[in-house]
Image: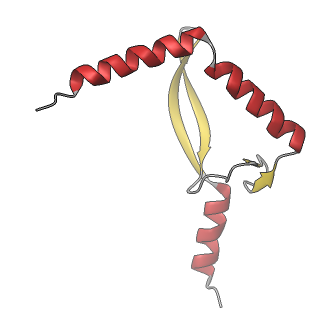
């Protein structure tokens, strides 16, 4: 049997925690509110904005996301930034 306290905790988890962040958009500071959830959705699922539950994505949406991720990964700027980052890390790590 669940108590009222544990039930409220489960409800809060489902709703997510409201987080306030300061973001710079169009050269100005803006306060942006977003929800933070204690668990991530598994692959092939997305977070429903209204209920906060993980909902299975359609096959078409999964395919489109996969294609978009592949295109983004193959951009020359992404590869250049990755190479710069790797070089920075190598310079920080000293082998004895």
Q: Name the residue: 63% across, 17% down.
A: 74
As drawn, is 79 to the left or to the right of 90? Answer: right
As drawn, is 14 to the left or to the right of 17? Answer: right
Q: Name the residue: 64% across, 86% down.
A: 2
Q: How many marks?
A: 0
Task: Establish if 6 lies above or below 41.
Answer: below
Q: Position of residue 9 (x, y in %)?
A: 58, 69
Which quarter of the picture shows residue 19? top right
Q: Position of residue 77 (x, y in %)?
A: 55, 10
Identify the residue at the far front of this view.
96
Q: Name the residue: 83% across, 46% down.
A: 57
Location of the C terminus by quadrant is top left
Task: Establish if 34 lies above or below 68.
Answer: below
Location of the N terminus by quadrant is bottom right
Instruction: Choose between 29 and 56: the one closer to the eye.
Output: 56
Instruction: Choose between 91 and 45: the one closer to the eye.
Output: 91
Task: Establish if 46 lies above or below 88.
Answer: below
Task: Establish if 60 lies above or below 22.
Answer: below
Q: Name the residue: 62% across, 54% down.
A: 16
Q: How is the image coloured?
A: secondary structure
Q: Position of residue 78 (x, y in %)?
A: 55, 16
Identify the residue at the far left of this view.
96
Q: Position of residue 10 (x, y in %)?
A: 63, 69
Instruction: Choose between 90 and 26: the one closer to the eye.
Output: 90
């Amino acid at each position: 049997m669940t108590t009222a306290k544990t039930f409220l905790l489960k409800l809060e988890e489902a709703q997510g925690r409201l987080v306030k962040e300061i973001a710079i958009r169009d050269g100005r500071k803006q306060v942006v509110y977003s929800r933070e959830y204690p668990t991530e959705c598994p692959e092939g699922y997305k977070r429903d904005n209204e209920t906060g539950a993980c909902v299975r994505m359609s096959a078409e949406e999964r395919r489109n996301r996969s294609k978009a991720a592949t295109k983004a990964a193959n951009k020359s700027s992404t590869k250049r930034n990755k190479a710069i980052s790797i070089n920075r890390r190598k310079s920080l790590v000293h082998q004895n």
